[in-house]
Image (tube, rainbow, N blue to C red):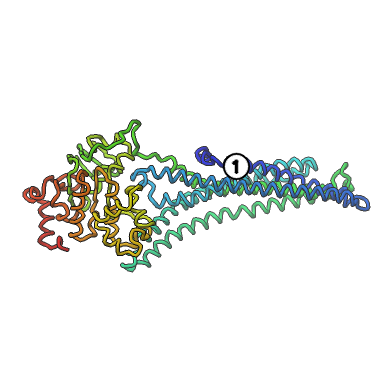
Amino acid sequence: MIKKLAARVRQYKKNAIATPLFMVGEVAMEALIPLIMSWLIDRGIEAEGGDMGQILLYGGILLVTAFVSLFSGVMSGRMASIASAGFARNLRHDMYYTIQDYSFSNIDKFSTSSIITRLTTDVNNVQNAFQMILRMAVRAPLTLIFSMIMAMTINARISLVFLITLPILGLGIYTIMSRTHPIFRRVFKTYDRLNNVVQENLHGVRVVKSFVREDYEVQKFNAISGSIYKDFVHAEKNLAFMGPLMMVCIYTCTLLISWLGAKAIIASGNDPAVGMTTGQLMSLITYVIQILSSLMMVSMVFMMITMSRASAQRIVEVLDEQTDITSPKLPVTEVPDGSIEFDHVDFSYASRSERATLSDINLKIPSGAVVGILGGTGSGKSTLVQLIPRLYDVTEGAVRVGGIDTRAYDLTALRDGVAMVLQKNELFSGTIKDNLRWGNENATDEEIVEACKLAQADPFIQDFPDKYDTWIEQGGTNVSGGQKQRLCIARALLKKPKILILDDSTSAVDTRTDALIRAGFRSYIPDTTKLIIAQRVSSVMDADMIVVLDNGRVADVGTHEELLARCEIYREVHDSQTKGGQDDE
């Protein structure tokens, strides 16, 4: 895990290496300051009559030492900030690009809310830990070593007093960390649930308000938020013992050293050759405080590592996840035509699912055909068409496009040859032109207008003040459902695909507009295979062939007249719509 995270430092290695180098300078100067202070006291202030020359000399040295320490500290902090921010940037970059290669099943495994938490909260935690490791994880042991060496040179016997506190500190830190880590692991999983609730609420805000369910949503949010609060309070209560524990150790050591040092000064008469001087005692106290403070820094590093360890594991899970849909080593790079064949296809969303979503699907669709797909809710209509561009892979059997197994294609080439228009298609923030050029980034203004006319989108676009430069809000919230569907159809037409899939994508438009759109398809893309999933019989009755699905199986295939004569399911749907008048709405 550490190796995988460290590899993301990349171009910021120099900054990461420079941080501890500057830290060495800062710590070395801090270790010298108490020693110079003792010389100033013993050789200047405590000298007979006070030696102003010595005071000025050591005072000047102190000033230079403090300035060098300050400069080194500032540079160390600056380098650490650049390295940690760059490290977080690379992490987010690599995670985002890895996620772009995920198949739908990979995304289903993590959930959208969990991925967002890992890209934000978890990366921030690891960034803070990395910065602390660069600085404190280097500073603490250096301070400990330098201070111990300096303290030993003054009085080895008295300076060993701090060893009394080491077992107490070690046991305390271990106990606190072992209790805190599981809490943080639980907290970050709860964060996923919190993000999911917020995301669901914002996406469905119209439904929430129309059903007056704000109070219910607030209660749901408060329940999860309260769970996070309780876990953090529990963790902070454990961590709160760290400060008092350190203070007790520091003050105990200070008192013991002061007592032993004072006895040594009195016994020696302030003669360094015999015992200790006042300046040495002051320096020794400072060094022991530095030693214990460095141990406190170590505990803080452990605390930060404990908090970030769970985040680091979650980040590495995203980076390690391998998409289950990839291009082969020697892929086919061009789709020859729009013919489609389903050869004994079985599919289930989970490998251990008791019930297959699709079972033994056998279909042959010639290139350029118009194919209608009908079936009840849960019959597998959307799943069937998602297998064509390999959004999912078949569990058994094969799907062939242009006579070639879809698994033999380069993914980009295959998906460039297939355009999908979903019932709940997404529009992105940007102008209408920006959204339409998702279908063809090099499309001219004339091609855009032509595609919109065929999709019956041009009339309402012309009513906007800015026409094709009209700004679309995120998700297309400032256009109606029917307008959004027509824009998405125009976007697909600009792609000029070999296969066009319309997954109930005219459900929000009236029957006349639906008929005009289908007529436009026949004239504009006659060689493109068109698969139309629809709830209305009128949307598919003029298709070359109609596939009726029932519980994941093909119930029948034929023309409108053939199915009316022999398929009971199709006849029931037709009669319910035509006799019930639904088709005229």
Of residues 168 and 287, which is closer to you in this image? Answer: 287
Can residue 242 be seen here? yes
Residue at (89%, 48%) from the top-left corner? 269
Q: Give the vertical position of 522 relative to 225 (above or below).
A: above
Q: Residue furthest left?
A: 565
Residue at (79%, 46%) from the top-left corner? 35
Q: Give the vertical position of 286 relative to 512 (above or below).
A: above
Q: Name the spot of residue 469 as percent of width and height, x first.
A: 36, 59
Q: Name the spot of residue 389 as percent of width and height, x first.
A: 28, 42
Q: Residue 479 appears in which quarter of the rendering?
A: bottom left
Q: Residue 342 appears in which quarter of the rendering?
A: top left
Q: Is residue 138 left or right of residue 45?
A: left
Q: Give the vertical position of 438 relative to 410 (above or below).
A: below
Which residue corresponds to mark 1? 16
Q: Residue furthest front?
A: 446
Q: Is residue 353 left or right of residue 29?
A: left
Q: Secondary structure at mark 1?
A: helix
Q: Name the spot of residue 477 as percent of width and height, x first.
A: 34, 61
Can residue 260 be seen here? no
Locate the C terminus and report the quarter of the image it occupies.
Answer: bottom left
Q: Name the spot of residue 116 as percent of width and height, x first.
A: 43, 51
